[in-house]
Amino acid sequence: MGALKWLIFLVFLNTYSQAAAQSDIKVSVFSATSKTVILRWTSYSGAVTYKISAAPLSSPSSPVSFVMFGPNTVMGSISSLSQDVEYIFTVQALDGTQTVLSFASTQTLTAPDIMDPIKTVKPKDSRTFMVEFNPKTGATSYIIRVENTNGFFREDTVSSSPAEIGNLDPYTEYRLSIMAVNNAGRSQPSSPVAAKTVLPPPQISTSSPSNDSIIVTWPPVAHAVQYTVSIYKFDSNTKEKYNTTNTSLTFPGLDAGYLYAIQSSAWDPEGRDGEGSLYVNQTTRPPTPSSVSVSVVMSGTLAKLSVSWELNKEVHGTVEYHVTSDQNLNCNSTSNSCILSPVACGEIHTIHTTASNKAGPSQPSSPVLFITFPCAPESLTLEESPKGNCTLTWNNVPYAEHYEAFVKIGDGTEATCNSTSNNCTYQCQCGYTYLMSVLAYNQAGSSPERKVLNYTTVPCCPDSVSVSAVSTDTLVITWNASQGAELYETRAADTSKVTLCNDTAPVCALSGLSCDSSYTVVVTPCNEISGCNQACKSHTRDTAPCTPTKPILNLKTSSIIGVSWTANNRAANYTVGADGEHARRTCTTSGNSCNITDLPCGSSFEISVTATSNAGQSLPSYSTSLETEPCCPVNLTAVQVTQAMSNVSWSHAKGANSFITSLTSPRGKALCHTQDTHCLIGCITCSMNYTVTIEAFSMSGRMSSCTYQGFSSSPCCPSGIKLYMSGSNSLGVYWRSTASSLSTIAEMAGISSNYTCTASPGKNSCVVKNIQCGGVYHVEVAPLTPEGSKVLFCPIRLYSVTCSGSNISSVIYRGKRSVE
């Protein structure tokens, strides 16, 4: 039960919510006429009927009309209204008790009333009407309805009268009516009026067949019975009209080169003049050029014809002038002149000038006959006479009236000669270039660029010719430059050959000549045009003597060398030179040999032979090397190192590269071979006299033998040495007898004391006294030199001396020690 109550409550709440959410009714104007307005509205739930009422906006509480509609209607009309009145319309939704559930209002203006018929319709052109009508009060615009019997229908909106109705068909009948329009809508159409468009304009074409006429043509216009053509001349008040039933018309007697405007229209059978065509501009052809004149102009070396004429300043537009010549030349211009190019000398031109504009060309001008300038004279030749006169001749030229010859000399001077014949004479000299040309003249001007004859007389012989020898086979020839010479040919000839030298400078070196020869030298000046002057004086010059050949050296002594050679010169002196590092030796002769003396030892020389004569000096012969014997060492020292070996040293020897040193005695020879300045020589015998010899060798093997003062080896050391007791504190020293004439000394050296004893020559023992026992002694027995010094390299023996009390008890030999 509780649940049912809640369900009933929810249904009631939902129904209440729907009613509360339903919006008010809305209304709008669908359309309006002058008597009726159609409204539409939104439906309203619960409405049984809808009531529409209309009241003037000026009296909204005084309805003038109403209408009722059922619940399912949402659009309806209300009538019996007045035209062009503002009304307020109210729509009410009523329930079954006629209670108003909702309402809404809107306002609008009724459309205007029907208008009066159109007053006038006039064709503006073949496709346009001009329409006039009486305006309607309250109308904001107007609609003009256009229709015809062919089903054409169109409505054009216009704002005022008169109005233009376009895009129609030419020569077509139409019915036109008008409606007034305001914010509410439009009125009913007025009664129609009929109107007919006129004929379209002819499509004219124009041309100018001559400079005083224009032809107008057009295709036929349908329904046309006649045409009117008008012509108007610009910059004047002249206008002419012509009627014709043809489709072409010619206007004669017009001004040349003037601009005309042409228009045409067609007449229909009703006698109405149709739409006029657009104006077409047509210019007549220009007048024929007059006062034509011709002259020659030059552009650099290019010749041209300048053609000019008078201009007609009243001619309209741009006029182009065309100039032609029967020599296949033509030119165009928009001014009063034109250039025909290129033209040549000696031509006859027939020239016509024609003016052209857009209409076409004029008649050509009267022909002008013009002869161009004459051609340059040909075949220029020069004849030179022995007296120094030159005559220039040339061929006659067609159309030439007179000639002018130009002579330009190389020194800058010029001369001219006027003549009606074909020659001219002037002076000429050697060594000059003459540039000669001839111009021919007529009324058109002179011939083109002069053809120059380049004539050069033979060059002058050079002066101050000098011939000198710069080497054994070369002569240098110099001279002063000569007038007109471009090239010099220098020729040197002896009995066997000719040597040439060509150069542009005034100096020439002739090389490769034969030595010790006499040459005849000629300098011949030349130029390319006139050739060479073969009449120049010659000069004689001898070349230097020939180089001596095959030098032979003959070593006569260590300081004298004999030199001989082969000589083929006619007369020459010879100098032999020996060139060393620090010395030069020479000898001179007119023969083929000589001796060079005073050559120092240990020197190298390059020996060559040179020949000399009045013509100069030869090249030296090929050199021959000479090496003198090396020098002997100045100082030599021999020092004995041991009893069987000595050290020999010597001073520097110039030119020596190696040495063989020899010690020679009756018992034999000891030697050494070295590059040093000293050497050790072994295997020598003591107490022997030696001869000392050094052989010095140069790099090439030259040898000097050098002998020095004799060398004596030291005395022989004693042998068989024994030490024995000779008393309480004495020791006897014994050695084997040497039969020497020298004294002998015995030395005993201990740690704290030294002892000696000496034996006379021939003796072989001595006694050392007062020796301290209990020590070790070094014992040496050596001979004394004659000067009294001890031989230093005798062997030393070692002995121990023992004691018995304070006396020597024994002597013990402990070995031998070498010399320190």
Image: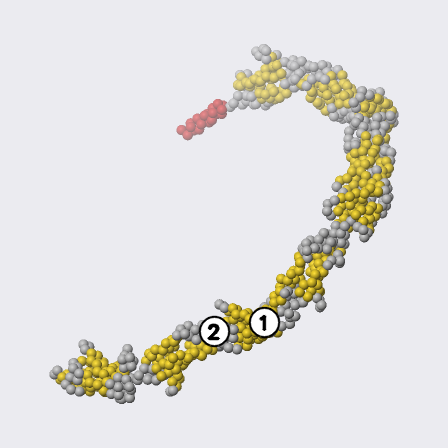
Which type of secondary structure does the marked residue at label 2 adopt? loop
Does 263 sit left or right of 694 as displayed? right
Name which of mark 2 and mark 1 comes first in the sequence: 1
Q: In the orientation shown, which residue stands out farthest toward the left?
A: 805
Q: Nearer the viewer, residue 621 or 283?
A: 621
The residue under the point 81% across, 32% down is 309
Write down the quadrant of residue 800 in the picture: bottom left
- Residue 376 at least partly seen: yes
Q: Is residue 708 above or below residue 65?
A: below
| Residue 76 image position (x, y, % from top left) | 62, 20
Q: Is residue 815 above or below residue 495?
A: below
Write down the quadrant of residue 649 in the picture: bottom left
The residue under the point 85% across, 24% down is 227
Q: Which residue is mark 2?
A: 601
Q: Which residue is mark 1?
A: 589
If the image is split into quadrants, where does the N terminus sit?
top left
Mark 1 is on which residue type?
Thr
Whole-Å distance between the Cαs marked 2 and 1?
A: 25 Å
Does 431 sit left or right of 694 as displayed? right
Q: Is residue 180 above or below residue 793?
A: above
Q: Are marks 2 and 1 in contact (CB under 8 Å)?
A: no
| Residue 314 image position (x, y, % from top left) | 80, 26
Which type of secondary structure does the marked residue at label 1 adopt? strand
Mark 2 is on which residue type?
Cys
The residue under the point 34% across, 84% down is 688
| Residue 366 image position (x, y, % from top left) | 87, 34
Q: Nearer the viewer, residue 114 or 472?
A: 472
The residue under the point 76% across, 18% down is 121
